[in-house]
Image (spheres, rainbow, N blue to C red):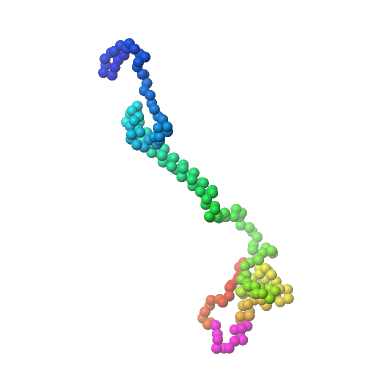
Amino acid sequence: MTTEDGTVETLTDVGSLRPYQYCNQELFMDKRFPPLSWRAVRDMTWMDGSQKAYAYLFAWTSLVVAVLVVVAFLYRVYMAFVHPLFFRFYKPPSGKAMDQKFRDVKEISAYVPQIRVSGYAFPFLLCDTKHIDDGYVGWNDPHHGLEKHNLVNEFERILAGMDEGWKVDDSDDRPLFSIVREWE
């Protein structure tokens, strides 16, 4: 056999030579995973320098990937079980806009401000209803209509019958009652 320095030697006991070197890559049982310290990589004497550098780089990469997997798993568990206990998700309607207009639906009513007073059969309206269809109110007085129950009309009658010394300022354009209006 020829050695590294070029000398020729004769081997007599071949059984005592090991033609291989044992490579211990067990990192989990030795509790060295991930091998982030140079001690863990340095103990692997069977590696050359570049292999040790790549092993160290691989250790950091595997640690980052493992942390990301754990964080993603915990996030999914949180969003599936914990988050719905405290927050609701908005789900937009899945349908598209219809061609049917609001005013064409016969069974529909709009929000019209009104107040119920005990002793009266119908509630009092707290807005001017001149600009909407009477069907949107949700009820109808067959004997008197909506005008008798509209407090806007009563307020105008009160102001008309009061002394001239008390007037509402004409420069103030703010409405005293709610405005309910329907557009085309």
The quadrant of the rendering that contains the C terminus is bottom right
Q: Which residues are magenta?
A: 157-168
Viewer-side residue, 34 vs 8: 34
Q: Residue at x 40, y 32 (%)?
A: 30
Picture coordinates of residue 182, whole percent (x, y): 62, 69
- Give how far across and how far down residue 107 sits, in percent: 69, 63
Q: Nearer the viewer, residue 100 or 169?
A: 169
Instruction: Specify whether residue 67 is painted magenta.
Output: no
In the displayed structure, 117 sits above or below 166; it is: above
Depicted 64 relative to depicted 165: above or below: above
Query: Looking at the picture, how far across and down is residue 48, in whole percent?
Result: 33, 29
Name which residue lies at 61% across and 74% down. Answer: 126
Q: Residue at x 54, y 49 (%)?
A: 81
Tell me the quarter of the image containing the N terminus: top left
Q: Quadrant of residue 61?
A: top left
| Rendered image quadrant of residue 65 | top left
Residue at the image point whose x is 49% and y is 47% from the top: 75
